[in-house]
Image (tube, helix red, strand yellow):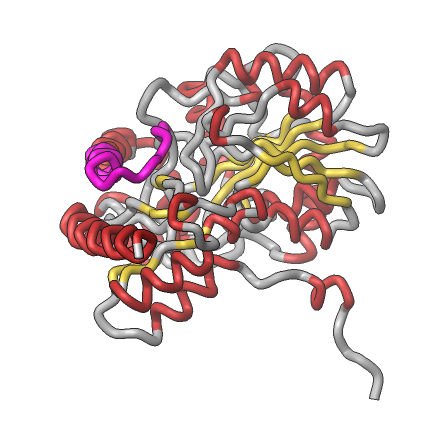
Amino acid sequence: MRNPLSDKAVGLKPSGIRKFFDIVNEMDDVISLSVGEPDFDTPWHIRDEGIYSLEKGRTFYTSNAGLKELKEEICNYLKRKQGVEYNPLNEVFVTVGGSEGIDAAMRAMLNPGDEVLIPQPSFVSYEPCAVLAGGVPVIIELKEENEFRLTAQELEQAITDKTKLLVLPFPNNPTGAIMEKKDLEEIAEVIIKNDIYVMSDEIYAELTYKDKHVSIAEIPGMKERAILINGFSKAYAMTGWRLGYACGPKEIIAQMLKIHQFAIMCAPTTSQYAAVEALRNGDEDVAQMREEYNQRRRYLLYAFKEMGIKCFEPFGAFYVFPSIKEFGMTSDEFATRFLQEEKVAAVPGTAFGDCGEGFLRISYAYSLDNLKIAMGRLADFVERLRKEQKG
């Protein structure tokens, strides 16, 4: 009997995040800090709009590109927040989460052998999506001493005559790193000089704690070279609604939409109506959630300092990325022992690329009470490890 499986699919490594998530589900009394899912309920007025859409019988397909009013609100939002203007008719479409936008962009833009520059540590989907689209992932290893930002020099050194696309994963999962305007301006010079494109994953754009998020699309000369990916999961606590969007040059969006037509048809109708309400009236909800995340972020940094654990200060998303190099074990070994001995789940840094070795991702999309318990257990764990090292 012939092999029914695709070599490409078989060759993909399973998600390191889900590995620990699955282990946690089989254990009792575990505090999980492993999944990037807000612990807040979707704000009531947003849920109410979804419920109302069902009560009104709005259970039909929308257009492939999404509800007209939602696309208009997306464009209004981006103009208001980033000062970038998109045409709702042909420069934006609604996706099933930001993840679909990532996949569709790569499939629409890449020819076999095209190189995709992927800064790591970063979200687990970029590399497999590039492979499935026929591209060749080229990893740029981000450095702790640079606060895990991508530098223009690192980008320039990675570009070859086969490079077509740069993934820009900021604010960053798992490190919490951000790119400021001056960083993006330097990156933009390299992109334009080398005639490449950028896919900017800005799903955490609303969750920055230093300055307002700056999009690469704001930088002069970049809007026509950038696919902007965003969504509702993180900012509005709408993970299960599965809704995102992609904006960019109309010729790229047209091909992404074609793929979306055949693979998806349209994003969930109920979710789209709820998202209109989120964009129109959700700023206050986002601000309140962001402030609570910021309190948790500051608490974790204080707790690490008290434990003597090195951790650079992240200014975006809802993750911290402490160094565990002093303990002389791999990230996977550390996370596994921490889970088994203290019943706290965190994700090894290597789940986000080999250069994540020596780090641990901890999500603070969890209650402060749970974080305090988990940090107490971490303090006990590292104290025990230090005693072991001393013999």
Answer left or right for 157 relative to 280: right
- Does the magenta-highlighted stretch encompass residue 325? no
- Does the magenta-highlighted stretch encompass residue 306? yes
* Identity of the residue furthest to the front in this view: 391
Expressed as whole percent of the image width and height from the top left, the position of residue 357 reads 51, 47
Q: Residue 387 sits in which quadrant?
A: bottom left
Expressed as whole percent of the image width and height from the top left, the position of residue 150 reads 57, 26
Q: Main secondary structure of the magenta part?
A: helix
Answer left or right for 79 relative to 37: right
Query: Which residue appears at 26% of the width and 35% of the height?
Result: 301
Query: Which residue appears at 39% of the width and 63% of the height?
Result: 336
Q: Nearer the viewer, residue 155 or 350?
A: 350
Q: In which quadrant will I find the N terminus?
A: bottom right
Expressed as whole percent of the image width and height from the top left, the position of residue 141 reads 60, 36
Answer left or right for 296 relative to 213: left
Query: Which residue appears at 25% of the width and 66% of the height?
Result: 30
Q: In which quadrant will I find the C terminus?
A: bottom left
Answer left or right for 287 relative to 189: left
Q: Nearer the viewer, residue 50 or 85?
A: 85
Q: Residue 384 sits in which quadrant?
A: bottom left
* Identity of the residue furthest to the bottom in this view: 1
* Identity of the residue furthest to the left in this view: 369
Q: In the figure, 237 relative to 210: above or below? A: below
Expressed as whole percent of the image width and height from the top left, the position of residue 208 reads 35, 27
Segment tinted magenta in the rendering: 295-315
Residue 270 appears in view = no
Q: Nearer the viewer, residue 145 or 364?
A: 145
Number of numbered callouts drawn: 0
